[in-house]
Image: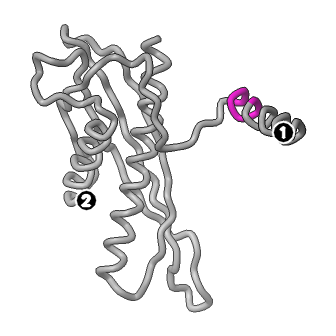
Amino acid sequence: MRKVFRYFLIFILLFTGCGYRISGISNNEGLNTFFYIERVVNLDPESSYYGIIDEEVNKFFTNHGLKKDDKADVDHFFAFILERAKTSSSITNVTNQTVQADMIVRVVVNVYNKNNKNIFSKNYLASSTFSVTPNISQNKVNNDNALRRCLRDILNDFLYDFKKTVK
């Protein structure tokens, strides 16, 4: 029994000591602030991305209990700018048809205080792979899901980085 406990303790110390963190697991202790979603901007030529971005950003802050809808109740104003979402073929089959593609998303995140002073600004880059099929509607779903995964990764990274700067 002691050996199992010892191995478990070593395992925990290794993960916490190296800075590893599980994406999507949130611990908001020490972050006593609320955000107002000031701007969600899509600079990518694909106009349908705006709805996905807006939904993911609002869902993320709501799920983490960090969003307020009244500007008077918040400490920080959040701006999320999608600069580019690029897809490229990564794997082709013997007939040179694409079977897998990569999506690379570049985002700028800004946080302003009540005095409109920029207190946090960072560029983020995330990527995700998705399958390409002969079905066009399924490809659109796969592409949108890849974008959602990238946005969630970026938002989790933002929250982690913001917690470090606030402390």
Task: State how far apart marks 1 and 2 are (Cα).
Answer: 50 Å
Magenta residues (range) = 13-18
What residue is at 37 percent from the left and 54 percent from the top?
85
Q: Foreground: 124 or 12?
A: 12
Residue at image position (84%, 39%) is: 7
Q: Which residue is mark 1?
A: 7
Q: Residue at x 65, y 36 (%)?
A: 20
The numbered disc on residue 46 is: 2
* Quarter location, residue 145: bottom left
Camera-side residue: 109 or 158? 158
Would you say the residues marked 1 and 2 are in contact, meaning their CB atoms lie under 8 Å apart?
no
Q: Amino acid at mark 1?
A: Tyr
Q: Is residue 36 left or right of residue 93?
A: left
| Figure colour scheme | one colour
Q: Residues within 10 Å of mark 1 (few under 14, many from 20)?
A: few
**Most common secondary structure along the magenta stretch:** helix
Residue at disc 2, secondary structure: loop
Quarter of the figure with residue 28 = top left
What quarter of the picture does the N terminus occupy?
A: top right
The quarter of the displayed image where residue 77 is located: top left
Across and down, in percent, residue 166 comes to 42, 13
- In this rendering, the answer to whether 157 lies above or below 162 is below
Q: Nearer the viewer, residue 118 or 71?
A: 71
Earlier in the chain: of badge 1 and badge 2, it is 1
